[in-house]
Image: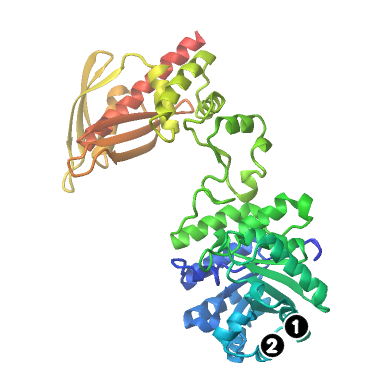
Amino acid sequence: MKSKKEKVYIFDTTLRDGEQSPGFSMNLDEKLRFARRLEKLGVDIIEAGFPVASEGDFLSVQEIARKIREPRIAALARISLSDIDRAWESVKDAAHPMIHTFTSSSDIHIKYMLKKTREQVLKDACDAVRHACGFTKDVEFSAQDATRTDRDYLCDMVEAVIDEGATTVNIPDTVGYALPDEFGELIAYLFENVKNIKNAIVSVHCHDDLGLAVANSLFAVKNGARQVECAINGIGERAGNASLEEVVMALRTRKDLMGLDTSIKTENIYRTSRLLTDITGISVQPNKAIVGANAFAHESGIHQDGLIKEKSTYEIMTPQVVGVTDTYFVLGKHSGRHAIKERLKKIGYNLSGDEIDQVFKRFKELADVKKEIFDEDLEAIVADDIFRKTDTYKLIYLNVVSGNAAIPTATVRMEVDGEVCQDADFGVGPVDSTFAVIKKITKTDNHLLKYMVNAITGGTDAQGIVTVQLKYDGRTVTGRGADPDIIVASAKAYINALNRIESLKEYDKGKND
């Protein structure tokens, strides 16, 4: 168990501030499902919502408070006493209920939004904290727009609410205005000038308007803050909040410098990020740190070569530590020979040095016209350049009868090693019956791994291209076929894959001889 001095508490606000982002609204079931995931992730506090905002928000907070037992469950409230009453009503059944109340502290907010004096706002803040403490000992107070607040007034407010019983004081960079050094220095200033500061946990809530939310959070922690308010994938108002995954992994990866850690089970980070995407339908950008599609992807030949030799050359954390299966090599024009050799091995092809050179030459030619090279492309290069021989099987004729009132039946005439063969068979559909009769004629039974259809052009008269993947001797063999008739294209693709298997058999036999 980490001591308070070495631990940073993670306050997740995905379900409150995060949900305020356009497009990220969730219903009650989705919120509960996500809260369960946050519990598995190991967050210390879940800010479940703003109960006074709507009946739906109240019910969501209430349900989460009743069902989620490990983390503290926080409800947000303005300093209005009725807001606080509503917040308490929503979290009172929680195993660890928390009330989070806030008001603005900057002169610009006090003048234009609250239309009060500093003295009135300070009194209201104290009254609110005192009222909240009548319900629970776990009360957090936030001074909204703290980074644009007069420092001495901010110190007075923080000291006063701690005296009233606040156990956490939150210093938000509400509009993402501060720079890291400046924000860290503000936290240090509070520790130097608020005499009772050690009676509460200092928290920070940073927005990303200048892209500095994570940096500001880390500088705050370095200067004494021990709670960070953040959201999965960095979602939140405007440009978002500090990203939970980035804060957590920065603390973990640079523990040598920070000497601090969290209770987050990092192997659940990626799954949590993916769940948010699944629920909202909004993906993170590919180059997003930690959870983006490219976070552990490498195309540069120099990087790929280094990683093959030693992972730490170009990765400061393993993908597995955040729940990603493995490093991914993107094969493109920057990839090197070593990466191609390793990928070929991974998909089951152990080629000689000369054969690797031959494949690599073709790979580079293809990479100049194609952004990314996939395993199927490599397989096609190997089949055509290394294993190619005269086709064993050729399609001569295909006729299929199908429909909702007929048993799908395919009749196929093929050439097998120069001999013409014809047969028919049934299936559950036109493609299934076609493949069944081809297997019958060729006396093969390879496991079908993938069947995929794409249109080469638009319109109902488009030519279709079919990709078929078959399993042979632990290897994946890909066949392709194109035709305006999808069933014919399917037959061509299947036969193309069978021909590649025959070439592979011949190659293996030659190597063994």
Q: Is residue 236 left or right of residue 391?
A: right
Alpha carbon separation for disc pair 2 and 1: 8 Å
How many numbered badges does the structure rendering display? 2
Q: Position of residue 232 (x, y in %)?
A: 57, 61
Q: Position of residue 450 (x, y in %)?
A: 38, 37
SS at badge 1: helix
- Residue, disc 1: 156
Q: Is residue 45 left or right of residue 368?
A: right
Instruction: Determine crowd level at label 1: few under 14, some 14-19, many 20+ residues with C-alpha closer than 10 A.
Output: some
Q: Quadrant of residue 218?
A: bottom right
- Say which amino acid is labelled 2: Leu
Residues at circles 2 and 1 in contact by the CB criterion of under 8 Å: yes
Identified at 56% across, 67% down, the residue is 14
- Residue, disc 2: 122
* Nearer the observer, 240 or 318: 240
* Nearer the observer, 313 or 501: 313
In the rendered view, would you say 221 is above or below 92?
A: above
In the rendered view, would you say 363 is above or below 44?
A: above
Identified at 48% across, 82% down, the residue is 54
Q: Is residue 38 left or right of residue 454?
A: right
- Say which amino acid is labelled 1: Asp
Q: Position of residue 190 (x, y in %)?
A: 77, 73
